[in-house]
Image: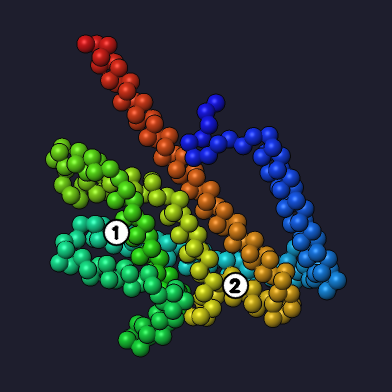
């Protein structure tokens, strides 16, 4: 057992205080949750009439209601998937361009990145919706949403990827150049795979942001899960219940993305260890023969 370099291990008294503080905070949270549930109950928000259409399959409106939510969810996932794909591709290209650009035109790349980073995503979506039709690009509402999300998130992903590339030791690229690889081969075969692996948590966090930002589709009258939820609320007058269910749907989607990132990172680590093991085994066999 070794003490942490950053702080000393807590002693018995510190552990006792931490346990008491945790218990007090837990009791306070339970009290707050109980008060909220009591208040909702007194206002009639916990009745079967409010929750039945969303949770009770025997309810007459359950099937129609979840049909609307399913249609909206499909729209949300479609827009999110397109925005993710375009943002990853364009963001990676921007990162590479900024890394390899010459000083005489690097300012242009930096200017575009900083400009788009500083504009709120809601303005991006509204700008695409109002300006593109005026120049002859009359697109379906989904594409205005995708363009706005891509314009904002691609520069964020570009900065994430660029940070991952710059964080790698210089010896990685120097060794690649030493064995005769060209700049494009060094980036595609050596630097980018390691940068994506190192920045995978940050990339997944940004993909989660894209999923949540699809709720801005109401600006362009796009049929997503939030817009369908508004239709349900107008007919059933149950905003709390509907938005709780919609929030749970978003939580499940984002949790699935996080689990996918963990699984991908684990598989990449296992693959890397397997390759190293094979190399070590081959070197051992070669040494034994010598």
Which residue appears at 33% of the width and 44% of the height? 194
Query: Where does residue 26 sit, x and y in percent of width and height?
Result: 74, 51
**Colour theme:** rainbow
Query: Where does residue 104 sit, x and y in percent of width and height?
Result: 15, 67
| In this view, 92 is above or below 79 | above
The C terminus lies in quadrant: top left
Judging depth in this view, the residue of 130 and 162 nearest the camera is 162
The residue indicated by pointer 2 is 226
Count of marks, rendered view: 2
In the drawing, does residue 193 fall left or right of residue 12? left
Precedes in sequence: disc 1 or disc 2: 1
Task: Point out which mark residue 95 bears.
Answer: 1
Q: CA distance from mark 1 to mark 2?
A: 33 Å
Asked where in the image residue 41 lies, by quadrant, the reply is bottom right
Asked where in the image residue 226 lies, by quadrant, the reply is bottom right
Query: Where does residue 108 sit, x and y in percent of width and height?
Result: 23, 70
The N terminus lies in quadrant: top right
Which residue appears at 62% of the width and 61% of the height? 249
Asked where in the image residue 63 lies, by quadrant, the reply is bottom right
In the drawing, does residue 107 fall left or right of residue 198? left
Residue at the far bottom in the pictured view: 134
| Callout 1–callout 2 Cβ contact below 8 Å | no
Task: Point out which mark residue 55 bears.
Answer: none
């Amino acid at each position: 057992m070794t003490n942490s370099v950053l702080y000393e291990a807590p002693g018995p008294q510190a552990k006792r205080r931490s346990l008491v503080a945790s218990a007090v905070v837990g009791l306070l949270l339970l009290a707050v949750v109980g008060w909220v549930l009591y208040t909702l109950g007194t206002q009639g928000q916990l009745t079967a009439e409010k929750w039945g259409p969303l949770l009770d399959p025997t309810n007459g409106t359950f099937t129609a209601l979840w049909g609307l939510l399913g249609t909206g969810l499909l729209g949300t996932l479609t827009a999110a998937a397109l925005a993710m794909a375009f943002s990853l591709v364009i963001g990676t290209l921007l990162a590479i361009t900024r890394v390899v650009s010459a000083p005489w035109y690097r300012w242009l790349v930096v200017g575009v990145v900083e400009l788009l980073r500083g504009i709120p995503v809601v303005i991006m979506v509204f700008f695409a919706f109002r300006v593109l039709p005026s120049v002859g690009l009359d697109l379906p509402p989904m594409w205005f949403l995708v363009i706005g999300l891509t314009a904002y998130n691609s520069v964020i992903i570009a900065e994430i990827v660029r940070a991952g590339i710059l964080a790698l030791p210089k010896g990685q690229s120097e060794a690649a150049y030493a064995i005769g690889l060209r700049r494009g081969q060094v980036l595609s075969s050596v630097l980018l795979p390691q940068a994506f692996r190192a920045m995978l948590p940050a990339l997944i966090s940004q993909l989660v942001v894209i999923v949540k930002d699809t709720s801005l589709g109401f600006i362009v009258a796009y049929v997503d899960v939030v817009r369908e939820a508004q239709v349900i609320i107008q007919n059933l007058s149950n905003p709390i219940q509907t938005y709780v269910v919609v929030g749970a749907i978003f939580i499940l989607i984002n949790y699935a993305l996080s689990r996918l990132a963990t699984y991908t990172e684990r598989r990449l680590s296992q693959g890397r260890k397997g390759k190293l093991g094979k190399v070590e085994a081959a070197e051992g066999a070669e040494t034994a023969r010598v």
